[in-house]
Amino acid sequence: MNRNPLVTDIKYLKGVGEARAKILASELDIHSVRDLLYTAPSKYIDRSRFYTISEMTENLPVIQVKGRFVRFSTEGEGVRQRYIGLFHDGHSMMHVTWFKGIRFIKEKINTGTEYVLLGKPSYFQRSYSFIHPTVEIYDPAKPPTGLQGIYSLPETLRRRNITGSTISALVAQVLDKFTDIPDTLPSEITGMYHLMPLRQTLQSLHMPSDTKTLALARERLKFEELFYLQLHILRYACRRNSTMRGQIFGQIGRFFNDFYHNALPFPLTGAQKRVIKEIRHDMRTGLQMNRLLQGDVGSGKTMVAFMTMLIAIDNGCQACLMAPTEILAAQHFDTISVWAEKIGLHVQLLTGSTRAKARREIDEGLLSGKINILIGTHAVIEERVQFENLGMVVIDEQHRFGVAQRARLWQKNSVAPHVLVMTATPIPRTLAMTVYGDLRVSVIDELPPGRKPVTTLLRYEENRHQVYRAVHSELLKGHQAYVVYPLINESEKTELKSLEEGYQQICEAFPSFKVCYVHGRMKPAEKEHQMQLFVSGKANILVATTVIEVGVNVPNASVMIIENAERFGLSQLHQLRGRVGRGAEQSYCILMSKQKIAALTRKRLNVMTETTDGFIVSEADMRMRGPGDMEGTQQSGIAFNLQHANLANDGQILERARKAATDVLAGNPQISDSDTTTAFTYDRDTKPLPLSAGSLHILAGELRLRFSGQYDWGRIS
Ligand code: ADP
Ligand code: MG
């Protein structure tokens, strides 16, 4: 029988059995031999080096010392009893203490024999000692070498008699017994990407000969994990692409050209041009476009959206733009109707507060095709809104819309409209490749010329006076100011109180200026009213919570104070900062923080003062917080339970794994049950990689094992 030893149930290993197998399964998710071998040690002991007792310092990891016990003594009574050995390493002495299993230790160890002790030095009464070290007899013929993995297990397991050494012993047993472990990656892939074979990888994961070998083993496991994740995501994308037919927008016609040649208000940036080209390409393929457009605040996404809509209109369709708030919808309407008017297109605004009569006209205009572009809030996806032929939908600031809401757009036309989702939350590329693995991502990585980067400063309570003076002089120049308070949980009364107090404080500090304020718990109408005061310039200062984070455009605002900045995430600070620096004037963002902040917090805030590049900010955010917290990941449906890879640090491995997955899919259409050649027309560097029958068998097995029924891959955008 040529059975794969990895699938062996863990209970069949010597020393496991039913009861322990149950605990391993429930506590550590270890069911099979494979699960055991894929469990990486949490730390490694350097077995090639012996420490001397005199070298011991605080904060050492587990280390090894070599020597002999000089004498033993028992101290204390009953449960307080402890067994203490005096250990001599040839130069100096240390204590070794046992609290449990004393009878066993007494029998097992003696004075005279040369031992190796593995332990973590603990400092007590001005000397170092070991408590419950691992004891091995030293064999000069076979001295320990290399690194040895150690496994830290939860306390609950120790009480049930399963410790790190239990795992070590099981791993050693398995690696000893199963010398022939079939690889989990096709040889075509391991060869092309120079990956360590699986057997050697597992050996090196648990007992690496040196740190370099360990690094190679880890890399191989990360690659494997990311490769299968990408293969899974992309396989799904292929299948969807082959079923989701889209309208073919084959021509650039009258409106696009007329606007481009005669009405463009400013020359497009290189990035805008590139992105429009990418979108045009998508809409020609006959597949439904699902594209995520990322661009920092102020990078000019609206123009890209408009020109995209023109392509749809040139091909006999209507277009629709959806924004998360009425204010944003109105702002888009103001901007876009000016552009559209110049080329004779008809634009309408539809929000919750559109009056009944106007609404009826809009309904008619949409059905008859008289309205070319509809701009609005959630109102546009209500059932009663029917189009003659909706071909293009743009969604601004995607994270405010739920997946279900977006899905309703598909039903507005017999052929699903193309979808462009725009976001100013820069998602690091590695994260986007995983979360939005089946979405095309376009990036506007260039700001329009002439922008002055916002100057960001970190200031403390004691500087408040000075900060207010600076704000005052901006106000005197006729500019406006934001003051932002963190209301992380707006249902909390105490936090609301800090906003109200802040409002009072600002009113007192700036008596000759008009101050308005908004927060998330206000009635929508009141919020609109207050916002409008600021947008129209009637109010000079807006005191607000993070409700202003998204999209508001007041180019005259040149300064923002963010209170308790240490309580915001970096990406959020960046979003907030994007509200200033929209005009031609030099703008300022002042981060106010308590005087006493932790070093890490200061480091975080310094990222803000050092760069205005949203991608750098978001990469730093991800590195400091971990990908699980990033905006957009929760709703994606992907659990971020990667076992080996770390999206924040393993971007390069992810890129290679994705390339491998793409090439494999392109070369083996049977994997996705679809015509993959059409799905990958975009990736120009795809080189189809056909696999042998044996390799395909490996892939099928792995996909089944890793993803069987785990994910329900609905359309994510
Ligand atoms: P965002 O990407 O944040 O939505 P907007 O589309 O609101 O950015 O653009 C911000 C500002 O930059 C607007 O006033 C817009 O008219 C202007 N703008 C956009 N593209 C250009 C360009 N190529 N040259 C100059 N100004 C531009
Ligand atoms: Mg915008």
Image: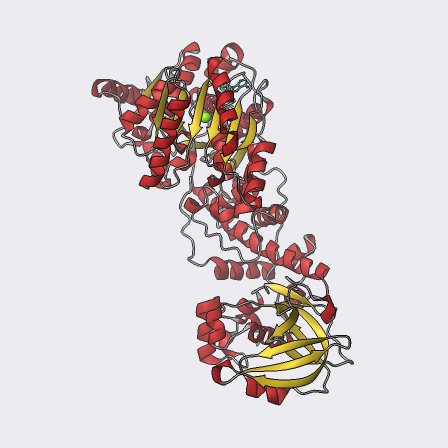
For the residue pair 347 and 279, the one nearer the viewer reads as: 347
In the displayed structure image, the side of residue 524 where residue 155 appears, left or right: right
State whether residue 360 is above or below residue 106.
above
Residue 167 in view: yes
For the residue pair 549 and 181, the one nearer the viewer reads as: 549
State whether residue 494 is above or below residue 253.
below
Q: Residue at x 58, y 45 (%)?
A: 599
Residue 322 in view: no
Q: Residue at x 67, y 80 (%)?
A: 86
Q: Residue furthest bottom?
A: 107
In the displayed structure image, the side of residue 675 where residue 611 appears, left or right: right
For the residue pair 338 and 701, the one nearer the viewer reads as: 338
In the displayed structure image, the side of residue 689 where residue 231 appears, left or right: left
State whether residue 552 is above or below residue 172.
above
- Viewport quadrant of the N terminus: bottom right
In the displayed structure image, the side of residue 311 where residue 520 appears, left or right: left
The picture quadrant for ligand 2 comes to: top left
State whether residue 487 is above or below residue 208.
above
Q: Position of residue 605 (x, y in %)?
A: 55, 37
Q: Residue at x 48, y 32 (%)?
A: 575
- Viewport quadrant of the C terminus: top left
Q: Position of residue 387 (x, y in %)?
A: 31, 26
Total of numbered circles in the picture?
A: 0
In terms of image quadrants, where is residue 169?
A: bottom right
In terms of image quadrants, where is residue 273?
A: top right
Q: Position of residue 514 (x, y in %)?
A: 37, 18
What's the coloring here?
Answer: secondary structure
Q: Position of residue 373 (x, y in %)?
A: 37, 21
